[in-house]
Image (cartoon, grey):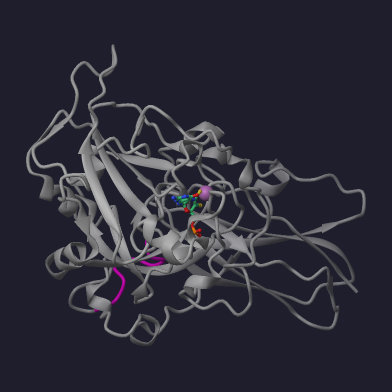
Amino acid sequence: MTDPTRRDFLATGAVAGCSSVVAQESPALASPERPFLTPADEFRDVSRGTPKPYSLTGAAREAARLTPETWRLEVTADPATEEPHTKVAAVVARPLTIAAGTALDLPALLDLGKTHQVHFLKAMQCLNIDTPLGQGLWTGVPLRDVLRLCGRMTNVRRISFRGFHNNDPRQVFQSSVDYTHAFETPPGELPAFLAYRLNGEPIPPERGGPVRMVVPWSYGFKSIKWLQQIALTNNPRNTDTYAEGNNDPEAVLKSAAFSDPVPAMHPADRPLVVRGVVMCGPSGVRRVEYWVRRVEADSPAVADDAPELLRAPWAECPLDPQPDWTRTLPAGVRPQDVLGFDRTTGRPREWPLRYSVAPFTATVGRLAPGRYEFRARAVDLNGFFQPEPRPLQKSGKNAIQVRRFEVA
Ligand SMILES: Nc1nc2c(c(=O)[nH]1)N[C@H]1C(S)=C(S)[C@@H](COP(=O)(O)O)O[C@H]1N2
Ligand SMILES: [Mo]
């Protein structure tokens, strides 16, 4: 009954540092041959644990309940109280536990999917890495529909969740959403959900399978891989592991442009074309624009909010036409069934799609020999220029990338 992995679910945060995540350039979504959907094994991986949970095989993987047959989800109420924030504990009518034989298994989740399944496109982005990790078509069941199985709940203010962590409390990686975000999805908004398919296939172990939480509006740390435990709590405070890294654990994805690396040397007789992707956060994307700055070896760096940058002659980078949806989406997934797409026309209701990335092209043309810097930035629907409105990078990675190169 007392499963050591469940102890201190909400009280502890992981001691395992965020230092395992090093900020660096990722080629994953910034390569010339970028497909609209990133193959599952080409996402850049951000996983804690020693050994990494996905490296377990055979009996060890079964014992960890990381196979489709052994996977179980427990949903329990957090009994903790703590003055002054939590005067009474959360209560749930029908907890789902392994001990009582009521934990949810994969067939039961798939069965729920027959009536509640959702599909949508989301780019995974780490709050601590410069470029998005990959973009997928995720399929699963909204968290709200799973939690309804538990019947009446009282004094629940947050929903906290964690994945498998090698039975080592220091490897715990957990995250959470508030009650409102779990249950009261507004029309047109995307729900947090328990995903069991990625790009039309079962989610592979590397991407968090059999079942992964996907929190559409947030950075990757909310999308808990190898999901196994959900706790309903009356602790109103955020206990996300990522909060310990000075991150804003309620950050939402920022609209931001990410340009592909520019080769260090560019021939003067060839026009320069730079590609990239723009992430669409809740504030949308009005346009993407670029600026090429001539520099000398000793030119000082230009800050993202320097007058020279703000007054610069930025030029628009058109977004690519939308892909052919019937050919881009996995077999069996109709465009009109993807959240964010119009039910009758089968076209996205807005473009770029919220919480996904769309490719753009900057056609710079020919440049005279010399040294240059290339920058691209997004302008959101409120007229804010990247990295506005929040230049705190721990609340959303959206610094303007600087690509230095020489034309010869
Ligand atoms: N259980 C678990 N879930 C996790 C993590 C982890 O270490 N353990 N890393 C998180 C972080 S910080 C990110 S950015 C994403 C990365 O997802 P990916 O490896 O599928 O690209 O997974 C998230 N989910
Ligand atoms: Mo992350």
The reply to whether residue 378 is visible in this rendering is: yes
The reply to whether residue 190 is visible in this rendering is: no
| Residue farthest front in this picture | 59
Q: Quadrant of the rendered structure where residue 352 is?
A: bottom left
Left or right side of 127 for 139: left
Q: Residue at x 47, y 76 (%)?
A: 36
Left or right side of 243 for 376: right
Q: Is residue 359 above or below residue 400?
A: below
Q: Quadrant of the rendered structure where residue 305 is?
A: top right
Quadrant including the C terminus: bottom right
Nearest the eye: 277 or 50:
50
Quadrant including the N terminus: top left
Report x, y in % for residue 131: 59, 58
Q: Residue at x 29, y 76 (%)?
A: 347
Report x, y in % for residue 338: 27, 71
Can residue 178 be found in the magenta stretch? Answer: no
Q: Residue at x 78, y 77 (%)?
A: 366
Q: Quadrant of the rendered structure where residue 327 is?
A: bottom left
Report x, y in % for residue 263: 78, 71
> What are the residue bounds of the magenta stretch?
346-354
Report x, y in % for residue 190: 28, 56
Nearest the eye: 78 or 218:
78
How many marks the image carries: the answer is 0
Nearest the eye: 238 or 404:
238
Q: Is residue 235 above or below residue 384?
A: above
Most frequent secondary structure within the magenta stretch: loop
Nearest the eye: 90 or 395:
90
Left or right side of 17 for 351: left
